[in-house]
Amino acid sequence: MATPMRSNPSDVVREHLVRALDWEDAHVSFDKALAALPAQARGVRPHGFECSVWELVEHIRIAQADILDFCVNARYAHHMAWPGDYWPPAPAPPSDTAWADSLAAYRRDLERLRQVARDVEDLTVLVPTGTGTQTYLRALLLTADHTAYHVGQIVAVRRALGAWN
């Protein structure tokens, strides 16, 4: 039996990373986790939960934006304080516009991270402002893992609110 032709291994890894940033192979995607969420449920913290869906969405967006900035900004300097700067100040979005803007920013930054996965020549090199093991590959995997974790929390919050089907 003939061995099938394979793509360049680097291209295979890159495309896997692109998909992993918001995949549904073994997870619920960000968009699916938020589909048909009633507006009145966005800012509710169910009993036993520390966060609302809004808080989780904003946290994902803020952390992803910081990682993207780290990857693409040659003058990046980490100034955000943990945990306060990575979470919104209130459990509910201040407006429908703030909700929509947050989702749009998340999607824009996600696409830019996908571009990083496609365009960086060597994903295993340190990000220029990084230290230790802070490679592009690590940043992309960290983003995928972080998002998947919190998307799972969004689903759990929605279930607790009776807003998941």
Image: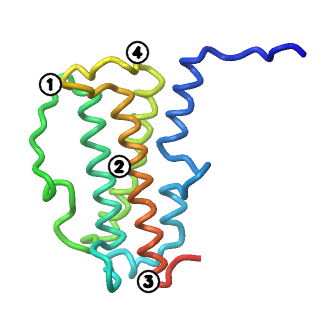
The mark nearer the N terminus, 4 or 3, is 4
Q: Label 4 belongs to which residue?
A: 122
- Which element type, helix, strand or loop, lies under badge 2? helix
Name the disc covering residue 75, or none.
1
The disc placed on residue 161 is: 3
Q: Which of marks 2 and 1 is in front?
A: 1
Q: How far apart are marks 4 and 3 (CA)?
A: 44 Å
Task: Say which quarter of the image contains residue 165.
Answer: bottom right
| Category of crowding for the residue at label 2, using alpha-carbon neighbours closer than 10 angstroms: few (below 14), some (14–19), many (at least 20) | some
Instruction: Please report contact status of discs 4 and 2: CB closer than 8 Å, yes or no.
Output: no
- Nearer mark to the viewer, of 4 and 2: 4
Residue at the location (52% across, 26% down)? 14
Q: Distance between the residues labelled 4 and 2?
A: 27 Å
Count of all numbered marks drawn on residues in the image: 4
| Badge 4 density bin: few <14, some 14–19, many ≥20, Cα 10 Å | few
Instruction: Note whether 116 is above or below 107 in the view shown.
Output: above
Q: Nearer the viewer, mark 2 or mark 3?
A: 3
Q: Which residue is drawn at 21% across and 63% down?
A: 88
**Given the image, on which type of amino acid does mark 1 rest?**
Arg
| Badge 4 or badge 1: first in the primary sequence | 1
Q: Where is residue 109 in the image (x, y as percent from the top left)?
A: 37, 41
- Mark 2–mark 3 distance (CA, rounded to whole Å): 26 Å
Q: What residue type is labelled 4?
A: Asp
Select label 3 or label 1 by which is in front: 3
The residue nearer to you, when weighing 20 against 34, is 20
- Residue 101 drawn at (x, y percent): 34, 57
Task: Please tell me which of labels 3 and 1 falls first in the chain.
Answer: 1
Q: Describe the element under mark 3 as helix, strand or loop.
A: helix
Graded by Cα atoms within 10 Å as few (under 14), some (14 to 19) or many (20 or more), the crowding at tag 1 reads few
User: Which secondary structure lies at badge 4?
Assistant: loop
